[in-house]
């Protein structure tokens, strides 16, 4: 399972100005002149890396550290009209997006590109998206062949092959399948089968009686009706009501996001005979023939068995014509962004304005960059790193990773709640972590992908089919441990439990995460905490169930598992108490893994920073000690705000806590923060020592 720093991550280069706060605790010692642990210039030439201009010094850091660091920004910054949220992450994503656009733009004007090269395909793909006039002329025409395929279905027995075909086109349907490492035999690829089929963000949008969710449902029916009418559906009003009713039934039988976080509960290995018994009437042979899997496997891993059983009954109990209209709707929904302006506008009106509160669509060039990013991510990434990533930054990152691993090792060795037996296993797993930094060692081959400059929908279909076929082609082959799950130009990071790897794309290795011109403290508070965050995913409530080879295996003693459960339970309770929007509390169980990673990642980053100092005193820069600047570096990374509709969506669907919670909550559990800023009983950030949660 892949665990990311963010579900949607984006960052920024920040200016450095302002004055030191009055609570700086000690006079500045003489600055050392030797190179620091990251190998950067002498400390005398280094900046703090802290953006002081947005501090609100009327807010005490002991009361609300997030607002202390970003209060002026929160009071004055406006979320751009084409975004649901905005902050330091988003600014950095804008930088990556602009750089990608500059690369693409240079290719579109190059008359000497080799036919069939990645560069030529990127230019052609982008050109096909930017040809809005052709999209308007074609309107719904590019989808009619797919509609005709759906119309050929006459009975439920025809659906498995149809679902398989539509899935290859990137259409989200109740049955999803994909190829990944077997979670209990990580040296082997296996087929996973999982639930799907909803159009609204989560099952809560269908099932909750909350007035907001009822409003979303009402708007959804009107949206479906309008989209189907534009597609040629004669009875669009009835069809829309039928689709909401059907999707509500699908939502009722789906597992919750909290249930889906359990890697053991969602691992159900079944041979083909048992799979058939699980879903009476659903022809898996036809389905897998349609996906291209055929008879390449003799077992599958079903993530939600009860859903599949209930779905089989729902398929047979629902009129065929309702299912066919639903399939057409799902195709329209999946391809609306690539059709004529009337489809694009209506899709944006509901999906972005209604569901997320975004008033204005992105410029077409940004959406075009996104299309290239989805279809040919590593082809674009190879050009990106060649132009924008300094090779020396990779070496500096390797040093940071080394210090974080050592800090984690020391932390495990000194845990008081874990037995020597389990510690030994944890240290073995830690020793097997594989870091990947900036970009892959080998790039993906796109030679078989066909791109045409005058066929946008065709390009989308072919690129999605290409990805599907590449996925299936892995079956029976050795696991590719060099493969990346993110492109280099992505502002994010992740942990992959089946590879036991931590991955940091090039685009995140920039300020405020990583600043080569800044003193180490801010880098440990930024990218150091990110490294610690991703390592911690290997030891969160989900990742801790896999061993160092990436296999699901219980390596815990019974007592240690119980101790771990008590600690994680306390963290769930803590985060349940945060309410970023009145009436909408953080779901501590849904966000548990990310909250463990935030708390442990920051704690380990602090320890690694102490290791980097080698026993020497940290310089005081801008009037702040090294420890203070580390925590300030952490808080400025999470600077951000979101529209109310987006906050509701994220609380319902996102395993990450909101920005202000991430900026503050881990600090309240960390003794070093109390010492650095003199937090005492009576301060709003104060939590009694016996109620603080420290896990790793």
Image (spheres, grey):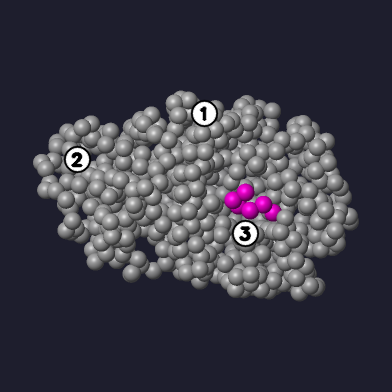
Q: CA distance from mark 2 to mark 3?
A: 48 Å
* 169 up-or-down from 294: above or below: below
Q: In the rendered image, which quarter contains the C terminus?
A: top left
* 336 up-or-down from 178: above or below: below
Describe the element under mark 3 as helix, strand or loop. Answer: loop
Magenta span of residues: 254-259
Residue on which the image places disc 1: 548
Question: Where does the image place residue 689, in percent across and percent down from the top left?
Answer: 34, 48
Residue on which the image places disc 2: 618
* 558 up-or-down from 632: above or below: above
Residue 18, can we see it? yes
Residue at (33, 69) in percent of width and height:
75
Residue 130, can we see it? no
69 left or right, relative to 172: left
Question: Where does the image place residue 260, in percent across and percent down from the top left?
Answer: 62, 47
Crowd rating for badge 2 (residues with CA inside 10 Å; few <14, some 14–19, many 20+): many
Question: Where does the image place residue 594, in percent across and percent down from the top left?
Answer: 48, 47
Q: CA distance from mark 2 to mark 1?
A: 35 Å
Q: Which mark is residue 202?
A: 3
């Amino acid at each position: 399972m892949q665990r990311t720093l963010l579900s949607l991550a984006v960052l920024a280069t920040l200016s450095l100005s302002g004055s030191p706060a009055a609570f700086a605790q000690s006079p500045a010692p003489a600055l050392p002149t030797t190179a620091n642990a990251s190998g950067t210039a002498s400390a005398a030439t280094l900046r703090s890396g802290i953006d002081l201009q947005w501090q609100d010094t009327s807010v005490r850091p002991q009361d609300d550290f997030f607002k202390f660091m970003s209060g002026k920004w929160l009071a004055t910054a406006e979320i751009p009209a084409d975004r649901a949220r905005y902050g330091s992450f988003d600014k950095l994503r804008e930088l990556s997006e602009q750089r990608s656009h500059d690369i693409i733009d240079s290719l579109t004007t190059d008359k000497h590109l080799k036919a069939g090269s990645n560069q030529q395909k990127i230019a052609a793909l982008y050109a096909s998206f930017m040809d809005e006039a052709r999209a308007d002329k074609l309107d719904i025409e590019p989808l009619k062949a797919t509609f005709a395929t759906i119309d050929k279905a006459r009975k439920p027995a025809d659906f498995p092959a149809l679902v398989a075909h539509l899935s290859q086109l990137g259409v989200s349907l109740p049955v999803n399948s994909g190829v990944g490492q077997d979670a209990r035999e990580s040296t082997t690829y296996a087929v996973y089968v999982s639930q799907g089929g909803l159009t609204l963000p989560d099952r809560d949008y269908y099932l909750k009686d909350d007035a907001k969710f009822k409003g979303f449902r009402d708007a959804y029916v009107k949206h479906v009706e309008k989209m189907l009418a534009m597609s040629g559906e004669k009875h669009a009003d009835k069809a829309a009501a039928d689709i909401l009713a059907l999707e509500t039934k699908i939502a009722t039988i789906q597992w919750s996001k909290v249930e889906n976080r359990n890697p053991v509960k969602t691992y159900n290995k079944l041979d083909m005979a048992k799979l058939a018994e699980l879903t009476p009437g659903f022809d898996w042979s036809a389905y897998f023939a349609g996906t291209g899997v055929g008879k390449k496997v003799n077992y599958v891993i079903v993530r939600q068995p009860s859903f599949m059983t209930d779905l089989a009954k729902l398929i047979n109990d629902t009129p065929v014509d309702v299912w066919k209209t639903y399939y057409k709707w799902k195709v329209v929904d999946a391809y609306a962004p690539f059709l004529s302006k009337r489809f694009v506008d209506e899709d944006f009106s509901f999906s972005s304005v209604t569901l997320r509160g975004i008033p204005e669509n992105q410029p077409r060039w940004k959406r075009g960059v996104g299309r290239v990013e989805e279809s040919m991510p590593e082809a674009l990434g190879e050009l990106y790193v060649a132009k924008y990533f300094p090779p020396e930054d990779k070496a500096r990152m390797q040093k940071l990773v080394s210090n974080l691993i050592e800090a984690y090792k020391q932390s495990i060795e000194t845990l008081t709640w874990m037995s020597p037996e389990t510690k030994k296993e944890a240290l073995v797993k830690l020793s097997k972590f594989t870091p990947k930094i900036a970009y892959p060692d080998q790039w993906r081959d796109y030679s078989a992908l066909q791109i045409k400059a005058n066929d946008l929908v065709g390009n989308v279909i072919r690129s999605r089919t290409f990805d599907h076929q590449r996925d299936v082609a892995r079956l029976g082959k050795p696991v590719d441990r060099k493969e990346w799950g993110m492109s280099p130009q992505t502002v994010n990071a992740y942990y992959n439990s089946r590879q036991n790897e931590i991955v940091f794309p090039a685009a995140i290795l920039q300020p405020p995460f990583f600043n080569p011109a800044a003193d180490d403290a801010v880098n440990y508070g930024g990218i150091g905490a990110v490294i610690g965050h991703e390592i911690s995913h290997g030891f969160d409530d989900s990742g801790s169930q896999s061993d160092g080879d990436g296999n699901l295996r219980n390596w815990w003693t019974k007592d240690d598992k119980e101790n771990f459960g008590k600690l994680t339970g306390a963290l769930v309770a803590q985060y349940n108490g945060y309410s970023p929007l009145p009436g909408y509390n953080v779901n501590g169980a849904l966000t548990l893994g990310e909250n463990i990673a935030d708390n442990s990642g920051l704690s380990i980053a602090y320890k690694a920073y102490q290791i980097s100092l080698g026993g020497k005193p940290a310089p005081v820069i801008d009037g702040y000690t090294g420890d203070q600047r580390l925590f300030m570096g952490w808080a400025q990374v999470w600077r951000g705000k979101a529209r109310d509709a987006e906050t509701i969506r994220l609380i319902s669907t996102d395993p990450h806590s909101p920005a202000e919670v991430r900026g503050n909550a881990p600090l309240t559990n960390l003794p070093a923060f109390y010492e650095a800023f003199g937090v005492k009983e009576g301060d709003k950030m104060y939590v009694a020592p016996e109620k603080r949660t420290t896990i790793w």
